[in-house]
Amino acid sequence: MQAVPQNWYLLLSTFMFCIGVMGVLLRRNAIIILMCIELMLNAVNLLLVSFSSYAGNAEGQVFVFFIMVVAAAEVAVGLALLVSIYRNVASTDIDILSKMKW
Amino acid sequence: MLTLILLLIPLIASILVLFLKGESVKWFSFFATIVQLLFTFYVYSVFQNKEAAKSLLAINIEWISSPKINFNIALDGMSLLMVFLSNLLMPLIVLAGFNRTQERSHIFYSLVLLMHFALIGVFVSFDGFLYYIFWELALIPIYFISLNWGGVNRITVTLKFFIYTLAGSLLMLFGFLFLYWNTNLHSLSWFDLTVNHICSCKQGFIFWMFFIAYAIKIPLIPFHTWQPDTYSTAPTQGTMLLSGIMLKMGLYSLLRWLLPIIPNGVAEYTPIAIALCVIGVVYASVIAIMQTDLKKLFAYSSIAHVGLIAGGIFALNMQGIQGGMVQMLAHGINVVGVFYCADIIINRTGNSNINSLGGIRLLAPRFATYFIIIVLGSIALPLTNSFIGEFMLLFGIFEYNSWAAILAGLTVILGAVYMLRMYQKVMLGDLNENVTVFEDLKWNEELVLATIAVLIFVFGIFPKPILELVEPIATEIFKISFVK
Amino acid sequence: MVISQFIFYTLAAFTLLSSLFVVFSKNPIYSVLWLIVCFFTIAGHFVMLNAQFLAVVHIIVYSGAIMVLFLFTVMLLNLNKETEPHKPTLLKFGAVIAGGALFLIVIAAMRSGMPAPYVAPQMSEVGYVKNIGMKLYKDYTLPFEVASILFLSAMIGSVVLAKKERS
Amino acid sequence: MTQTIIQTSNLYLPTLLIPLLPLLGFFINALFGKKLGHTSGWIATAVLFGAFACSLFLFLNLPAGGSETITISNWFYFKKIFIPFAFLIDPLSITMLLVVTGIGSLIHLYSIGYMHHDEGFSRFFSYLNLFIFFMLLLVMGNNYLIMFIGWEGVGLCSYLLIGFWFKNQAFNDAAKKAFIMNRIGDLGFIIGMFMMLFYFNSLNFDVVTIGALKLGIGNMTIVYITLFLFIGAMGKSAQLPLYTWLPDAMAGPTPVSALIHAATMVTAGIYMIARSNVLFSLAPHTLDVILIVGTATSLFAAIIGLKQNDIKKVLAYSTVSQLGLMFAALGMGAYESGMFHVVTHAFFKALLFLGAGSVIHAMGGEQDMRNMGGLGKFIKITFATFLIGTVAISGIPPFAGFFSKDEILATAFEHNKVIWGLLSFSSMLTAFYMFRLVYLTFSSSFRGTDEVKHHIHESPATMTLPLIILAACSIIAGFIGLPTILSHTHLFKNYLSSVFAQSKLILPAGHEMSHSMEWILVGTAVTLALVSIAFAYQKYVMQKHVPAADQDLKGLSKVVANKFYVDEIYNTVFVKPIMLLSDLFLVVVDKLIIDLLVHAIAFITNQIGRALRLLQTGHVGFYMFAMVISMIILLAVQIFVVI
């Protein structure tokens, strides 16, 4: 029924992942970086689901489910952190946050 | 099974002590070590019966299947000797702490007992990996003992000691891994390793890995610089543990994990090892002559003595090996006595410089008597315990090379020089102005010193049981390690 | 079966484009919005892969919860085009090149591990709610419950973090 | 090989009792001495008389020329080498036993009086008993290791007794010096034992002897063994170059000087060589060395003795000189003569020391002869006995010293005329300085303060009785060894003949000396002694010459009075460099080189850490770049390198 070769999914998710990486490198706004991470996570999700479907194995989808759980928790905590950082330095620019060295 | 009990008594005691407070801590520790000592005598009686011993003393359970690591503990003559030494000294070390106030004594004694556990573990394990675990475990309690209860400058000194020994252990671990992958049995069991030698081309490499680890622990020249500082800084009971038992770990390991495992490697590098040992004997003795700090003087004398033991072991002949074993026992007893005497003096006078002491014999004649007995024991007067060991060791070295024996024999002269010089400056003469009051021995001090004095004579006059105990294993090690 | 291929390509194009927009939009608000689009297309992919349950959950969790959170935060912090910090141009080039290089190298690395170009399609029903439900509640009960604890702690954590500190 | 069988000979019990009695005395005095008070001295003396009685029993019951080994246990063993704890009873050891216990008990008796006022009274007697115990072990052991126990043990007791008054650091220095000098010799002894173990696999006297005989005369192995053993003897018996401790050892109480540093311990070296006579006979080179060292020591010490003013120092140098004479005898293979002189010397030298002790006792601790004089009037018994001792040591017939000395000189004349000349000269000097001592001390008028003069008194009976007994012995002891010109049976030689029988076979037999020649030699010796006595009389009695104060000395006499500066030379050549070396090792090698290396390693690690931490910029962007680039590199490596 599925006429799309799995390779395409691989390529797609890899490409998406790389876009996410590029975004992380490119932007300085912490919120955007967080979003790019979501993008990367989704690329992985897509890959997992495609494998699960093609192999007829439900484990992959269960895994994706848990990734979503983690992603949701991560975003919640991450954003809370960002808000509290913003409250202190009035910016979300990651280059300002360079106190953690040596 | 009996061996396991021997191993567990200190561990359990170490945990239980944590729940006690005040004076009961000391009494409980003392009680535990005495129980352990009595039990050792029982084990010895079982050991004499060869048939029963086999089934009762050895345990070999698979622990980790891959890599193949077994929980393999057993007892043979040499192990039993070392266990006996530890268990003999432990009550004395605990007793030495009576009448002394100590902060957080329950933690202190817990660490001491934990150390005891680890030391026994080192002596009874017959699996390389298990042995390594105990070897490293022994380092932890003594580190904290020196760090928390030590003297001036303890942090730097303890760190130096810790890193020194750890570096050596790392090499040994590396050696063990190398050994594991390069023997065709893929096992670290002592019984396998002694039968199934690694290709002699690789033994030289392993020799250095192990030798440096042991040379640091023993310590041999030039790996000794941690020792004088550590001895003078650590609390007395720590020093007694270190010098009395922990050093013996290195010597014991030479005999257990070096000679029979890689005989060709040992045979190849024995000249260098003996040269280091013999030079060390003279070098440390000469330094000891001019030392003014009491504890440092004894530390250097200890380096000289253990250098002689190691030299005898590396002579690779029967009397050297057997003499080494006997001398380990003797040196353990003597060095503990010597350091305890030093502690009594320093504790009473608050002074460790021998030039500002003197005339103590006038005030404390009983202490002076015990001290001179211990001093004579450590300069190996006949009929004291270290004479026979020293005689056999020197003869062992003599058989290897007569010039080396003459050089090492200088310890006979130099030992007398520094010990008598020390005794004269500290105990004899008229009272120094720094020494005005010197209380004679308290009951616990007298008990410790009297025990040591008795032991010095007992093992000097009746050395035969000890020699017979270690003879089979010494013969075995000699046969395995004898390379044409 | 051209239709499914057509749908895939369209969705894929949308996915990639929207994610590129996420990265390159100047205004954070637009990034968020494009991300929502992206998530929807991914949900579409899930449907295509017969993973209906996940598709629905994806929309609810990501587009519904997470993205709202993002949007809310962006607006709360009043981030806009003017406040948006920028990297030097050289670094931007570097980032693009690094991303491209990573893509190439990952593809190259996967080359040997790629499945055959055409895999016999499997009529799978694993993505149905019933199957996933059985899996989750029978085989993965413990992780499922642990996940709820994770959520709880995340919730408490974010409340604690976001709460205004009294000084 | 194992000798575990316990002999049930009738000698077993007395043999065992001989060393055990003094040991028992030691324990009683050491543990209960404080409570016993002055009784402890009597106990110590009693046990020694018991030991003497046992020795006499052995002497009477041992069949002539026989020997008996009494094994107590197997002390220890390794490999195939067994070291038994066993005693050898033969004429040689019985001779020594009688000397040690006999003179020992007299000196114990004397000490009761001498040490009466000392607070360490019981301690003194416990040490003395311990010393006797070790000395008996030394004498009785049937192998070198048992002998070595005694050997080191007497060294220890000598250390304890020299430093008996431990408040005085100079005395302690002397004690330490004695112990260390002895230890130098002991190292030689140990090495000798190793060689015996190595070549003969045993330390038993009989086994070693048999093994050595197999190797034959002049074998280098035996030469080395005997040389090392001789080093041991040099230390113990105060020969050149290790003699310097003996004069210093006079710091101890006078009975100690008499017992340990004159009569018994210092003769241990001679006993040891006599015991291993076969070995030494097989090594002619060693015998030559012994002869030269002995002669040199005898002369050297006699010369130093001429200029000493401390009454005990004179006796000490005379002891060194006499020991040298004994070694010279041994070096010529005349073991019996050496042993004979040991016995006679033990009597008269103990007598002299005890007499000196009595003088010091009378003078209230004064030892400088320049402050004495005219004491003969005050302490008559002491004077009389001391004079007998002096005559005996000077070699005037028929006193004991004459016979033994004459025997040695006769052998020397036969052996080598130069040696004879030197030894004769040395005994002439002996006669001179001994009479110088007597004249300065006892004749003319008193030179000390009135306070001291008032104090002078004769010693109590416990002190004078031993003096009288010893004086009697000094007169008659010589008759056990009459020279051939007077008698056909040399009792002493006959008694010991079984011990030295094998050596006699090895050594080249000397031709019998003609009687006329012997008479000439005796005449020469006596004349020389009389001449030097007359010379001393002329100088110190007629001219009333008193030795000058130390600072007035000039030239050669200053050098001699300062003992040829040997101590100072040793100090600069050995002690100072070792101390310097010690500091050098500690400061340069330990602290500088080794610790520098260790610290260098730590420093390098530290610096690397310092450099690497700069990578930690704190910029998240940088970290992410680093991460991605590392990922790329890793994957690239995986693709292009590994595959």
Image (cartoon, coloured by chain):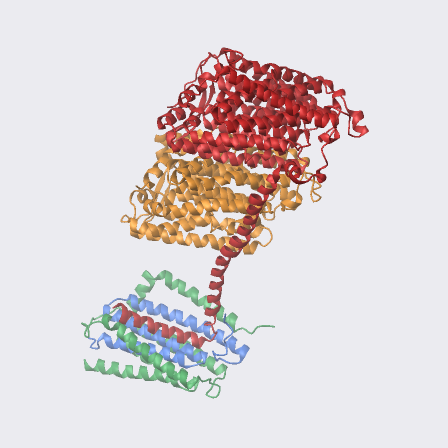
Chain colours: A blue, B orange, C green, D red
Q: Is residue A96 visible?
A: yes
Residues B9 and B383: in front is B383
Of D121 and B410, the residue lying toward us: B410
**Relative vertical location of residue B357 with respect to residue C122 in this rendering, above or below:** above
The x, y position of residue B167, in whole percent, is 44, 55
| Residue B445, image x, y percentages | 60, 37
Q: Name the residue: 39% across, 43% down.
A: B314
The image shows a total of numbered marks equal to 0
Q: Using the image as rendered, state which of residue D473 and residue D123 is in the foreground.
A: D473
Q: Position of residue D302 (x, y in %)?
A: 60, 30
Residue D357's image quarter? top right
Query: Which picture quadrant has residue B61?
Result: top left
- Taking the view exactly as shown, the residue that stands out farthest to the bottom is C82
User: Could you tell whether D271 is left or right of A61 in the image?
Assistant: right
Question: The N terminus of chain D appears in which quarter of the rendering?
Answer: top left
* Residue C47 as seen in the image, left or right of residue D176: left
Q: Nearer the viewer, residue B121 or D289?
A: D289
Pick the quarter of the image with the C terminus of chain D: bottom left
- Does residue D324 appear anywhere in the picture? no
The vertical placement of B266 against C119, above or below, is above
Q: Residue at x 80, y 30 (%)?
A: D449
Residue C42: x and y, percent? 32, 78
